[in-house]
Amino acid sequence: MRKKIPCYKYVLILPLLLLLLAIFLSYDILHRTPPVFHRHFPQGVHEVVIPPVTGIRNNLLNQISLIVEKSIADGKYPGAVILAGHRGQIIYQGVFGNRRIVPDIAPMQLDTLFDMASLTKVIATTPAIMQLIEQGKLALDTPVAYYWPAFAKHGKDAVTIRELLTHTSGLPADLPGPKNQENLIIYPWHGQQAAYNEIERTKLINSPGKKVVYSDINFLVLGYLVELISGENLNQYTQNHIFKPLEMTSTFFSPAAKLQGQIAPTQIINNHLRWGEVHDPTAYAMGGIAGHAGLFSNAYDLSIYAQTLLNNGRLAHQTEQVNYLLGPLTILKMTTSQTPKEITNVRGLGWDIDSSYSNRGILFPLSSYGHTGWTGTSIWIDPVTQTWVIILTSRTHPTPANENAVPADRQTIANIVAASITDTPVTNVNNTGTGELMRAYQTNEK
């Protein structure tokens, strides 16, 4: 007769078996080839309006939806809003996919609010700085330290406002800090003053004026200068002097909680969905208001801003006190090349003109200008053809794709819109820059 094992011995054997199983599974997971994750977003909304406008080849504009919907199906971004105008008229309006996937699926809408990310630089901070220059309160080539003496620490005494605006200051791209599991910086400090203290301690990585290094710190400094010179915080200043005069009623920092349902959320960070809160790590640590990021807006408001610049700064809704956002010559200065000829990433004051990461495409003239945002936003404006293109996606939602398809889509859509224009003379118009050719032939600067 077989001898029975006492019950208490099972209690001792069971943990040992579980431990062996855990070791086996751990080894298997560590050495197994990781599975390929196929992203696929639901098709969602497809609403396209292409009005009949003289001087536009509508058949080309029909191609835009094919590009966007393929990217949605491939899991590149969950949805998009695209708006384009020409000579004061809307020529393309497209609403695609969904504005969010989690916590539930919600269809994209034309008035969806997006986290503008770095569009904050040119929609809020740059015009604010240019207004103060117009008023004689700032000088373009005066060192920043003249207005902010503590900025001069660690060899930054000669950095000028022009160099901040053109990203030739020599400052690094970001303030330093540890990164989390999503490879985003999570700062150990909080608040605006803490950020400014960090800037004072920051050292240059290049000599000023020699090289373009796209830097959020440049616009953190510029945002602070707006506050120092005007006596208003950046949120107040931009509302009072930019957005209210333009009647951009859906553009603001730190959106109210009641607007959450209208906002396209961004990324899940540390198991928390950024929804109505700024995605950018530095702006987030500063409380949501900063010169480089933090603004929320929609396609309609951005179209007002773009058209105002094409109208030489003249406001569509004028008052007795305010007729212009900026003067025509100020806009010309801001949106034409302000970098030395040997620098191939051509920048205006705040604006991108012809850089390696430009959303211009290859057909719009070199006199055009624009900017992009990390979250998937962009704007391009061309005074020669009197055309603007706005592309808004939330590409980081719910997590960023391994491959960022938005830059390629932006450039392709810009080319389609530019190619559709037939009512613009091309005499004395240049759309091929030295930087573009150097990059095309792989001889761009190191």
Image (cartoon, rainbow, N blue to C red):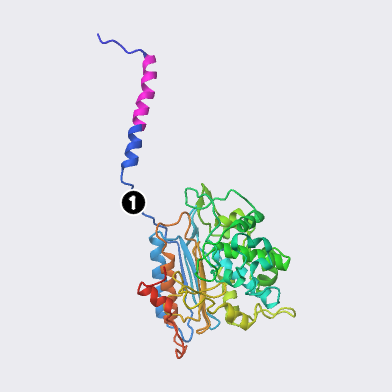
SS assignment for the magenta stretch, majority: helix
Q: Position of residue 55 (x, y in %)?
A: 46, 86
Q: Is residue 180 visible?
A: yes
Identify the magenta region: 7-22
Crowd band around label 1 with a 10 angstrom C-alpha radius: few (<14), some (14–19), many (20+): few
In the displayed structure, 387 sits above or below 22; it is below
User: Residue 72 or 155: which is nearer the viewer?
Assistant: 155
Q: Is residue 161 left or right of residue 371?
A: right
In the rendered image, the quadrant that contains the C terminus is bottom left
Q: Is residue 297 visible?
A: no
Residue 25 image-quadrant placement: top left
Specify the amino acid type for callout 1.
Answer: Val
Q: Residue at x 44, y 82 (%)?
A: 431
Q: Residue at x 40, y 59 (%)?
A: 75
In the rendered image, the quadrant that contains the N terminus is top left
Q: Which residue is mark 1?
A: 36
Q: Is residue 185 left or right of residue 148?
A: left
Q: Position of residue 285 (x, y in %)?
A: 60, 53
Residue 302 image-quadrant placement: bottom right
In the displayed structure, 441 sits above or below 194; it is below
Question: Residue furthest toward the top?
Answer: 1
Q: Position of residue 153 (x, y in %)?
A: 63, 60
User: Residue 202 or 60: which is nearer the viewer?
Assistant: 202
Q: Residue at x 39, y 61 (%)?
A: 73
Say which element carries label 1. Answer: loop
Task: State yes or no: residue 254 in magenta.
Answer: no
